[in-house]
Image: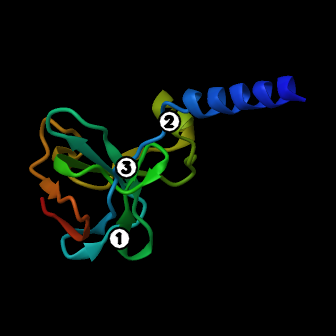
Amino acid sequence: MLRRSMLGLIGLALLVGCNSESVTGTVPASGKVTYKGAAVEGAIITFVPEGSGRPATATTAAGGVFSLTTVDASGAMPGKYKVTVDKVEYGAGGSSSMEAASTGNTDEGKVKRALPAKYAEAASTPLTTEVPSGGKKDIDLALVD
């Protein structure tokens, strides 16, 4: 009986210890994305930490709203971030498959960027924000040409 208990505890410790991707210390972080005053649905948002830290991501829903996630935890780590926003659209007769789109196969339809390219890369985006230790629920990402 003692041997089974010890094996069970060792197994539990291994399971807990192996989950190295789990993130603690995140705070709520959410907001809205607009382009030329209109809400943007289906855009991919990435908060790239300035310095060390973990990126946080989200996809905008109806109304352009988003709620960030860091690895497997809701929210973002407190800190300063460069913010990227990207959205691609697929032409008529196209496929919504990212794999088909990446091949550039014209039979699969045309792929075009729906937002200005400057927002798609951390090196060129003008968007920055800070997530305070108490979280931030009103992040307004207003994109322009």
Three-letter amino acid code of the residue under disc 1 = Gly
Three-letter amino acid code of the residue under disc 2 = Thr
Left-right relation of 68 to 122: right
Check the picture and name the quadrant holding the C terminus: bottom left
**Residue 39, x across and y down, in percent:** 31, 73
Label 2 secondary element? helix
Q: Dot 3, how many residues are within 10 Å of its Cα: few (below 14), some (14-19), or many (20+)?
A: many
Read off the residue under disc 1.
64
**Residue 76, x across and y down, in percent:** 32, 52
Between 96 and 32, the residue placed more toward the observer is 32
Label 3 secondary element? strand
Q: Does residue 39 sit above or below 51 in this rendering?
A: below
Three-letter amino acid code of the residue under disc 3 = Thr
Q: Which residue is drawn at 84% across and 27% down?
A: 2
Residues at circles 2 and 1 in contact by the CB criterion of under 8 Å: no
Left-right relation of 95 to 47: right
Label 1 secondary element? helix
Query: Which of the two discs, 3 and 1, labels the residue nearer the N terminus?
Result: 3
**Disc 2 to disc 3, how far (Cα)?**
30 Å
Q: Dot 2, how many residues are within 10 Å of its Cα: few (below 14), some (14-19), or many (20+)?
A: few
Q: Which mark is residue 106?
A: 2
For this orientation, the residue located farthest to the right is 1
Q: Does residue 133 sit above or below 14 in this rendering?
A: below
Q: Which residue is drawn at 17% across and 47% down?
A: 81
Is any atom of residue 68 visible in this view? yes
Read off the residue under disc 3.
57
Q: Dot 1, how many residues are within 10 Å of its Cα: few (below 14), some (14-19), or many (20+)?
A: some
Q: Does residue 135 sit above or below 50 in this rendering?
A: below
Query: Which of the two discs, 2 and 3, labels the residue nearer the N terminus?
Result: 3
